[in-house]
Image: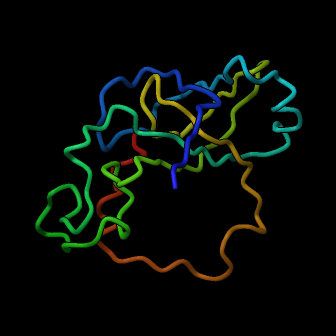
Amino acid sequence: MKIELVPIAYVKNSRTEISDDFWGSITSEITLTDDFSEKALKGIEDFSHLEIVFYFDRLDNSKIEKGTRHPRGNTNWPDTGVFVQRGKNRPNKLGLTVCELIKKEGKTLFVKNLDAIDGTPVLDIKPVIKEYLPEGEIRQPAWTVELMKDYWKP
């Protein structure tokens, strides 16, 4: 089966290099392609957060992970499978981030905490709806907290 996806928008921001930390100072613009009018975003301002699905288009195919690795190559963290991590070297090159909606202007969304570099193709935009979030406590290993300590810092 072949799946074909077409970008619905592109990211514009000051971040041009792929790197893992310090995304907190980045404000991004997500502008819909010419295939969409601003009507596609009607009502989006009623939501505080959005889920952005994007494509790691500049990822080198030779770096794609299909087995296990130490996150960020840190041997102090456990050797875990690609689907146990949220890293960029994924088999289908898909990224997913929950970000804060700052404002909408025409066909452009201004968001905070989107960890996608300038020019990244956006595949989908979904509002965050509380009822879709998990109930109860979220469990995760301690190494993930350590990994993320500088991720959203300015």
**Image point 74% across, 45% down: which residue?**
48
- Residue that sits furthest to the left in the current view: 75
The answer to whether residue 61 is above or below residue 1 is above
- Residue that sits furthest to the front in the current view: 1
Q: Nearer the viewer, residue 26 or 123?
A: 123
**Image point 47% across, 39% down: which residue?**
55
Image quarter where the C terminus lies is top left
**Image point 30% across, 44% down: which residue?**
20
In screen coordinates, is 75 left or right of 108? left
Using the rendered view, name the quadrant where residue 7 is placed: top right
The percent coordinates of residue 31 (x first, y second) are: 65, 22
The percent coordinates of residue 66 (x first, y second) are: 27, 62
Number of marks in picture: 0
The answer to whether residue 18 is above or below residue 137 is above
In screen coordinates, is 22 left or right of 42? left
**Image point 14% across, 61% down: which residue?**
74
Q: Nearer the viewer, residue 87 or 146?
A: 87
The percent coordinates of residue 71 (x first, y second) are: 23, 61
The percent coordinates of residue 21 (x first, y second) are: 32, 43
The answer to whether residue 124 is above or below residue 135 is above
